[in-house]
Image (spheres, helix red, strand yellow):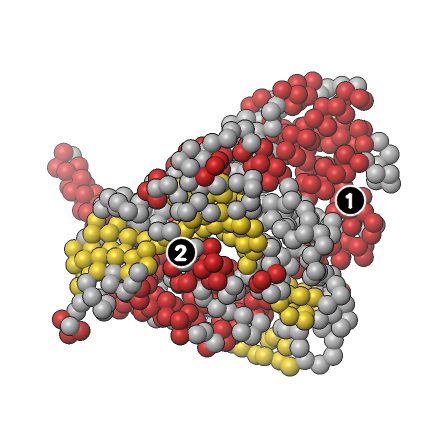
Amino acid sequence: MTRFLKYINYAIGLVLLAGLAGAYWTAYRPLAKRSGTEALPVSAAATIVRDARGVPHIKAATAEDAWFLQGYAEAQDRMFQMDLLRRQAKGELAAVIGAAALESDLESRRYRLRKSAEQHARGLSPADRAPLVEFARGVNAFLERHRGNLPVEFRLAQYDPEPWTVIDSVAIALQTFRAITDTWKEELLKETMRQHGDREKVDWLFPVRTGGEALLGSNAWVLSGKRTETGKPILANDPHLRFSVPSIWYQAHLQGGGMNVAGVNLAGLPGILIGHNERIAWGLTVLHFDAQDLYLAQGPAAAEVESVEVRGAKPAESNVALTRYGPVTVTAEGGKAYAMRWAGSLTGIFEYPVWELNRASNWEEFRKALARYPGPGGNFLYADVDGNIGHQVAGKLPIRQGWAGDVPAPAGGEWVGLIPFAELPSTFNPESGVLISSNQNPFPADYRYPVNGNFAAHYRNRQIATRLATRQKWGVLDTLDLQYDTYSPPAHFMARQLVAAVAARKAAGLDEPVAMLSAWKGTMDADRPEALLVSLALAQFRKEILERAAPGNGGSYDSQMGAAVMEKLLRERPKGWFADWDELLVKVLRAAVDEGAKTHGRAISSWQWGRANYLFQEHPVVSQIPWIGNWFRLGPIGLSGGVNTIATTTLRLGPSMRFIADLSSWDRSLMNIVFGQSGQPLSPHYKDQFERWAKGGSYPMQFAKVEAAGTLEIIVPPAAR
């Protein structure tokens, strides 16, 4: 028996060794080479220094070499993500994933993203094309040297990526543009609710957004030196985007040819979109100006037929009707077909001034670069080492003749041009020393052009301003703390309304929730029950409102203005909605308690907001492997904050990156992304930033002094010397 057990142990040991060898060969061996030498086609010797979090600090002789090496380093870390992103944009996911991705591909084909990317790529100027060409060359240098040793996802998915092209990067940029400006669903919902409900009540739920409102969403702000401890500006930015593994942003530091810039860009694109160079820092929030219109498709239209490859099945056919307004993209209730006019598809709109932005050294050069920024429309915050601060709206925003963006567009409704950059809102060195911008509507009420958009409510703006007023001098760590503020004004208001309603109606059986809400300070803390209770009540209240406005037709109502609309209704309590608003609120609270009991238990004191508001992400391929897949899932982890807090979090999105620039010393700046630099699951940088991100922390953003965790020396191949 002893000898038999010994043989069994030997067998188990051999299996484990084989497993480890297999894991090494398929998953560990392809990890980014961080040290040693690599012969690559650059003009002169260069280095890629990786810091403790795997961020590449690239030092090259020319800007072209720096972009090339950015493409190489990014492919080392993110090749599979980049390949999926370009396939999603071009409508080619089903070719490697199968039928599950077919609808995504067909939608992309209806938008004609690939054809728009091809058109835009052909129209690029030599200066704008250069960084995209060099980035693609760097990605392809990685692919050429690592065929047979690609990241494990390719081996598991059983395909090899094709060479990278300029069109691929342009397509990713367009897909991002599209995702951010896709407002047609809300606009179509409004029209459907109007047709089936009470038009006046529906209009309450979709307030017209023409300008002049102080309305914010994702966060950015900048303080002049008179408001900081160092006497130099501080700039903060934390864009709120959908969670993904790996993170949507890729960090890099690029030096070469007089360029010295650090920050982040979208995976698959060269240069730095948000960050700083030696002279200036800048942040970005999405403007949400309406850049799409739907037109009822009438009469004959040209057809565009494409074959969509589907893995394991016959090719599918994409049949897109083309009109003078654009492709027929949407089929709605009653079979109505709508053609889509979208700013991102306009001929000649696409430029790539990121390289110019990265070299800008003052406000004038910064604005000169942004004048060519194609979109999506954005609010750019600015600060420089001389103490100046500014805010500039940028992007290609359509001018509508006689209407602001109704759905469907009126017969004959035309776009008659784009708003000139010189007439877009701009602020430089305000007397207050403070600029706050987060998906805001910055247009004045008397703006000369029609304005409409899916702008967010005012809550974060007011809370940021309120917090900034609590102290005269701010430091970097104070600013980081502000980014993690979890106070929700609309939730706190709702709690007070519920308490008052119960008292007014002398409702019985609600003592525990009323006592809890009476003492609550309005913070959406993951480990506390109050935020969960109020959120359930808000959901019940929203359901009641929608049913009154458009019975059975408001289920997908998810307007960024939703919370502000609900608050306005409660404050004004207009006639014709409910006979007794207090009685309604009592009903809502009872329904919230009952709903919570079903999923969280009868003891309200044991509820936790983080069990309803949490982050859970899994690797798109490796997490599906039996037994070991769980090791590569992130979360679930309860998140503090909510949709209307400065620390914006939901099940789908949150701060995708935190950036704080200290203009007194770049090395005191902070930056982190959600998970890590690498998309490879066995990399030490797959999720090494996650824990600190979840707790509201960050990391020093190394710039002048870089602490090397590994240095890859890039040499010129002998044949090229």
- Look at the numbered disc 1 and give the secondary structure of its residue: helix
Q: Residues within 10 Å of mark 2 (few under 14, many from 20)?
A: some
Would residue 366 appear left or right of 559 to someone viewing this image? Answer: left
Q: Quickly name the residue at label 1.
A: 547
Say which residue appears at 48% left-offset and 41% top-offset: 224
Q: Amino acid at mark 1?
A: Glu
Residue drawn at x 67%, y 66% as measured from the top left = 399
Tell me the kind of residue under disc 2. Ser
Q: Residue at x 72, y 54 (%)?
A: 446
Quadrant in which the C terminus is drawn: bottom left
Could you say where residue 698 lies in the image, as x and y percent from the top left? 39, 38
| Above-or-below relation of 617 to 363 | above
| Residue 231, above or below 317 | above
Q: What percent of the width, then of the height, locates residue 230?
A: 40, 35
- Quickly name the residue at label 2: 361
Secondary element type, mark 2: loop
Residue appearing at x 47%, y 76% in the figure: 123
